[in-house]
Image: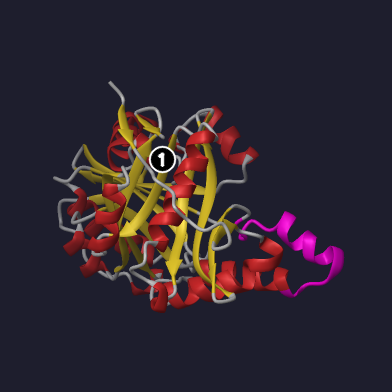
């Protein structure tokens, strides 16, 4: 039997309306910046600059900014009151295995207007749109310590699915010393099955639509090489060995964002030892200049990452409404 979640909308039409990029972008950028100033990274700040550029452009150039920008949200809702935008919700579509998934992002309300149900109203109308648009699911991320928001979303039908920490470090800050019985080598074809299994464990399929991780492209062989060439992917792998046993594999992937990605294929039993062995090696690579980011399950490998020079950027609770299970009336 399907579970039903009822979303009752009693919102004045002149207060909640769809986001208009040509009209609202600068106000929404200001609202996002004031609400998330402590967690904005260079990508986030570039996103806000792009929104403001579009608002300030003139004529056809103004439209060109929006239709060619990968940073500006083209869908969402705002709450307008007292002649100003005081609430915002962005909707970002993803497509994974032929199915549409919507991500709710940038839920922000001006401090003077909080605790009045604005965030709930924005979320409710976004869920309704997602359901009517036949999306498979709607997801959002919320800071793990924002208990009030988590409670609100749970009441609206969201279910917590994972809690993950994003770590960040500069390569020249990486430190550590491997134990005497471990060593680093290049990943071999014979390592792939174990690496693939561990990647699937640490980056589960229910979240992989969001990660810029294509596990098939990480493998050895001509198909993976062709995929990397076609999509201009640059990937390297390092295996950590104890005698003839593989403990884990660290993969590096160049990104077009401010930080390159690390993907760790290791079990909880061996992840600390893998990190202690491989991170100093990566830190000594002269060509490794850009910041490194690692997304990993919360409360795992904390000591090893901290000792190596990584800092936790943010821990997020992933929450989902599965529209195959939930009906809205």
Q: Residues within 10 Å of mark 1 (few under 14, many from 20)?
A: some
Q: Is residue 103 visible?
A: no
x and y percentages locating residue 55 in the rendered image:
71, 71
Is residue 137 toward the left or the right of residue 240 in the image?
Answer: right
x and y percentages locating residue 17 in the rendered image:
58, 57
- The residue that mark 1 highlights is 208
Find residue 229 and report its image quarter.
Answer: top right
Q: Residue at x 52, y 34 (%)?
A: 132
Q: Is residue 295 visible?
A: yes
Residue 327 shown in magenta: no
Observer-nearest of 318 and 200 = 318
Which region is colored magenta? 56-73
x and y percentages locating residue 49 in the rendered image:
62, 73
Up-down: is 52 above or below 60? below
**Quarter placement of the C terminus:** top left
Q: Residue at x 39, y 51 (%)?
A: 140
Magenta portion: prevailing SS class: helix
Is residue 216 toward the left or the right of residue 48 in the image?
Answer: left
**Quarter placement of the N terminus:** top left
């Amino acid at each position: 039997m399907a579970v039903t979640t009822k979303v009752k909308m009693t919102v004045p039409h002149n207060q909640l309306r769809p986001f208009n990029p040509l009209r609202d972008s600068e106000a929404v950028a200001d609202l996002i910046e004031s609400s998330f100033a402590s967690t904005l990274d260079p990508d986030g700040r570039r996103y806000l600059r792009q929104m403001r550029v579009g608002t300030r452009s003139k004529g056809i150039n103004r439209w060109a900014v929006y239709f060619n920008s990968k940073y500006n949200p083209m869908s969402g809702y705002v709450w307008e009151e007292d002649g100003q935008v005081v609430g915002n919700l962005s909707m970002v579509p993803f497509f994974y295995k032929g199915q549409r998934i919507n991500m709710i992002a940038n839920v922000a309300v001006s401090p003077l207007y909080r605790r009045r149900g604005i965030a709930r109203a924005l979320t409710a109308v976004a869920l309704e749109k997602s359901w009517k648009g036949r999306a498979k699911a709607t997801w959002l991320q919320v800071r793990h310590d924002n208990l009030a928001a988590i409670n609100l979303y749970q009441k609206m039908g969201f279910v917590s699915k994972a809690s993950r920490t994003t770590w960040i470090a500069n390569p020249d800050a990486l430190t550590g010393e491997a134990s005497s019985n471990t060593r680093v080598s290049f990943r071999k074809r014979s390592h792939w099955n174990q690496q693939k299994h561990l990647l699937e464990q640490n980056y589960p399929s229910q979240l992989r639509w969001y990660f810029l991780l294509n596990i098939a492209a990480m493998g050895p062989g001509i198909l993976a090489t062709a995929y990397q060439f076609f999509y201009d992917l640059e990937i390297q792998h390092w295996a950590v060995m104890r005698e003839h046993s593989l403990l884990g594999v660290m993969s590096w992937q160049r990104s077009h964002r401010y930080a390159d990605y690390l993907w760790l294929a290791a079990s909880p039993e061996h992840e600390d030892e893998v990190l202690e062995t491989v991170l100093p090696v990566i830190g000594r690579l002269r060509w490794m200049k850009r910041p490194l980011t690692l997304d990993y399950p919360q409360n795992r490998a904390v000591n090893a990452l901290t000792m190596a020079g990584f800092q936790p950027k943010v821990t997020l609770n992933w929450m989902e409404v599965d529209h195959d299970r939930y009906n809205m009336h």
